[in-house]
Amino acid sequence: MQTETRRAARPSFCWLVFTLKLSSRAYETLTRVVLVLGAALALGLPSVSFAEDCRGESEEFNWFEWSGKLDDFAAKLDSSITAERTQAARCLVHFPARLATPLLLEALKDEVEWVFMGMYPERSRACVAEVHPPVGIDKYPAKLASLNLDLAIAPLEINAFNEAKSNLRLLEYGILGWPVVCTDISPYRSHDTPVTRVPNEPEAWIAAIRQKLADPVVAAQEGQRLKQWVVDNFILEDHLDEWVRALLD
């Protein structure tokens, strides 16, 4: 009788948006949980890869890809922030630092001002120009903009967890108009993102970064194309009808 009461009380609609940062084991567990959520009529998921994992053998699987809300992010950017430039290009390594191998940092130390936000490889500290600690979400947009970069790189390890991630990092860099070199991985291929994707091999990263440094005008134009791509595709207010359909259909 108690079980019947619980079933009757269960809502007929359940809307889930997965934005948690989970370990690979937790991700696998969460995927199994999703498969048994019979009450969910629609799932808001960060990537196509995650949706395919959640779909399993189900014939009916209603989901939609949530779009990043960047209005608040863009509004907080301080366009007056500038920094004195040097001969070397400023290149951000945001996460994860362990993929920024000593070979990569050493090879480009005289051509690039390596800027880290968050973790950095301590054994290569001599090659790093700046290290910035993490900040609260309310200060994050202005802090990121203040770095005044020429290029951002977005390395990701190839594993199931990262394959299921969203492209949020590219949206953050893109709205700032920075050209991006990133790992060739599923979330960074989606929506024909105008970035340079490379395999996780130091030689490939070095070559791609040097190519950007060789023509800063073209690199800046690539950054502007990425910014326009973000504005055209990932402002939440422009996708409200998709959310409404997912919730009400």
Image (cartoon, grey):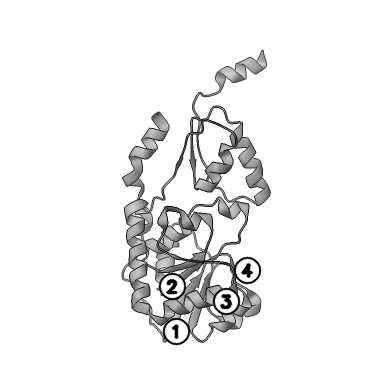
Which element is circle 4 on?
helix
Circle 1 residues within 10 Å: few <14, some 14–19, many ≥20: some
- Residue indicated by mark 4: 98
Q: Residue 203 carries which label?
A: 3
Does the image show residue 210?
yes
* Residue at 37% in and 63% down: 226
* Residue at 57% in and 17% down: 8
Quarter of the rendering containing residue 247? top left
> Residue 173 at x, y = what percent?
42, 63
Which element is circle 3 on?
helix
Q: Which badge, 4 or 2, is on the more N-terminal residue? A: 4
Quarter of the rendering containing residue 34? top right
> Residue 50 at x, y = what percent?
55, 45
Q: Residue 88 carries which label?
A: 1
Identity, as a three-letter code, of the amino acid under mark 1 = Ala
Circle 4 residues within 10 Å: few <14, some 14–19, many ≥20: few
Task: For marks 1 and 3, give the one nearer the viewer.
Answer: 3
Which element is circle 1 on?
loop
Depth check: give the residue in front, 201 or 130: 201
Does the image show residue 139?
no
Cα gap from disc 1 to disc 2, whole angstroms? 11 Å
- Residue indicated by mark 2: 151
Circle 3 residues within 10 Å: few <14, some 14–19, many ≥20: few
